[in-house]
Amino acid sequence: MKVTLFGATGKIGRYLIDEALKRGVEATVFARSGSTYENPRLHIVRGELTDTALLKEAVRGSSAVLSALGPTKLQHPKDLPITNATEAIISAMKEENVQRLIAVSTGTAVDPGDGFDWKVWLPALLIKHMMPSSYDDILGLAKAIRASDLEWTMLRAAFLKNSPASAHLNVGLYGHTRHSLTVTREDLAKFMFDQISDPRYIRQAPGIST
């Protein structure tokens, strides 16, 4: 099986790479042009997330695309880099007939089926007022994924931590599932890989926590 990883050189990405190597998966990592990341066990495609030809090369022949892309605090107030990148990735996937997309999002991107959960509502409110560009980018990413006709799963997390993997995960819509505030990056990476062959959450956006 072959997978393509986006955001793999970030904080979640290193766990995705570890998981791919543990599972013996053939992995392609899309790294930005300025990245110096190297790993002889991976195929690395370097470029910008708006380069259509390189995106198509990266996803070609993959069983699934896993994206850990997320906004940053430093982005320009009017920019939506992750939304634009996600739209470009979706376009490349359609052209290469790759259907399975598993992406990371946050509870800020509300699902129509959500109930009220202060553990999601409060962080979303803070992000909206303190980082409005990141807030808009989170919403834009979710909108782009939902508008696609791909077999997508969007995993929404609140706060991420680097602790060892947990023995139990809470997975489900906010307000209907008893969630904590955190999930480990290792748990998230493992769960993302599990979704490649699990249809349970196709075209769903469950919250995930430990």
Image (cartoon, grey):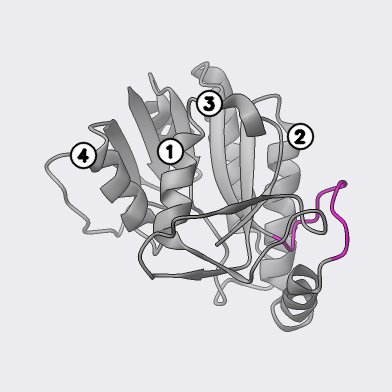
Say what amino acid the circle numbered 1 marks. Answer: Phe
Q: Secondary structure at mark 2?
A: helix
**The image quarter in which residue 123 lies:** bottom right
Label whose residue precedes the other's in the sequence (2 or 1): 2
Label whose residue precedes the other's in the sequence (4 or 1): 4
Number of residues whose C-alpha sits closer than 10 Å to that of mark 3, classed few (under 14), some (14–19) or many (20 or more): many
Mark 4 or 1, closer to the camera: 1
The percent position of residue 4, horizontal first and vertical second, equals 39, 35
Number of residues whose C-alpha sits closer than 10 Å to that of mark 2, classed few (under 14), some (14–19) or many (20 or more): few
Label whose residue precedes the other's in the sequence (2 or 3): 3
Q: Which residue is mark 3?
A: 93
Number of residues whose C-alpha sits closer than 10 Å to that of mark 4, classed few (under 14), some (14–19) or many (20 or more): some
Label whose residue precedes the other's in the sequence (4 or 3): 4
The percent position of residue 66, horizontal first and vertical second, equals 47, 40
Residue toward you, 12 or 143: 12
Instruction: Name which residue lies at 63% across and 71% down.
Output: 181
Residue toward you, 103 or 138: 103
Magenta residues span 107-116
Say what amino acid the circle numbered 2 marks. Answer: Ala
Q: Which residue is mark 1?
A: 193
Disc 2/disc 1 C-alpha distance (Å): 23 Å
Say what amino acid the circle numbered 4 marks. Answer: Leu
Disc 2/disc 3 C-alpha distance (Å): 14 Å
On-image quarter of the C terminus: bottom right
| Residue 86 vertical placement versus 33 (above, below) | above
Q: Secondary structure at mark 3?
A: helix
Mark 4 or 3, closer to the camera: 4
Which mark identifies residue 147? 2
